[in-house]
Amino acid sequence: MQEYKITRALPEDKGALLLIKKQAHAYFVQSLPHLYQFSDTLFTEDFINCYFNSEDHIALLAKINNQTAGYALIDRVVVDLPMMKNRIYVYIQDIAVREDSRNLGIATDLLHVIEGIAKEWNADCLELAVHANNQSAVHLYHRCGFTVRTYRMEKIICDHIVLENSDQTNIRDMGRSH
């Protein structure tokens, strides 16, 4: 088993982080083409830079022999709205592991480190969003103690959107009369 370490990312790590993001993004372009498209720009500069210069946003890296193998972007969110309970939670904005470094426990360990940071921030919980078709991620999150709280749903209403994934096509076609 390969040794790796998880550290806070520095601005000079941005390029390595974006290479992994590009690899992960290709999966979503292929599996969810009605939502994602290829692009050389995956994050705006303001968005990615906030993870290197803010107390409420952190970029974490997992490195194997000084090579970036995975990353996570996390946000501290303070809820202070009259209609809701005041609370603090950590939102996992993005997490990915390089394809050739998967199944080494990196994502699990990133989640454990995030949980530790959340406790330091006095957060009540961790939250994230995951696409239903990303079954390996769904399995990981369940295994790490995450539960479903909300379903985000969509209804395709224009004919020019074609879902190539047969499971999604079947879901889309279930409500149509033939």
Image: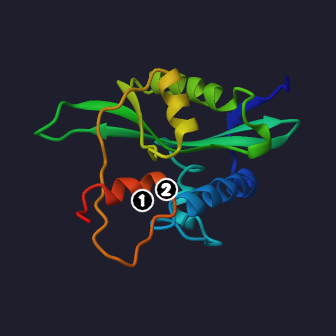
Residue 31: where, in percent of width, then height?
55, 57
Total marks in image: 2
Mark number, residue 169: 1
Q: In this view, does 1 lie above or below 89?
A: above
Residue 104 lies, in percent from the top left, at 75, 28
Q: Residue 178 carries which label?
A: none
Disc 1 to disc 2, C-alpha distance: 5 Å
Q: Is residue 147 left or right of residue 36?
A: left
Q: Which residue is more in the foreground, 10 or 131?
A: 131
- Work out whether 147 lies above or below 42: above
| Nearer to me, 67 or 12 | 67
Q: Residue at x 58, y 23 (%)?
A: 112
The 10 Å Cα crowd at callout 2, few under 14, some 14 to 19, many 20 or more, is few
Going by the image, does 172 lie left or right of 13?
Answer: left
Circle on res. 166: 2
Type of amino acid under label 2: Ser
Mark 1 touching mark 2, by CB under 8 A?
yes
Q: Residues within 10 Å of mark 1 (few under 14, many from 20)?
A: few
Q: In this picture, is 35 found above or below 93?
A: below
In the image shown, does 79 or 27 lie closer to the viewer?
27
Q: What element carries label 2?
A: helix
Extreme residue toward the bottom, this view: 160
At horizontal 64% and vertical 25% (from top left) the residue drawn is 109
Where residue 117 appears, as percent x and y from the top left, is: 52, 27
Figure quadrant of the N terminus? top right
Helix, strand or loop at mark 1 = helix
Residue sitting farthest toward the front: 178
Q: In which quarter of the image is residue 26?
A: bottom right
Q: Which of 9 and 160 is in front in this view?
A: 160
The residue at 55%/70% (across/down) is 37
Q: Which amino acid does label 1 sit on?
A: Thr
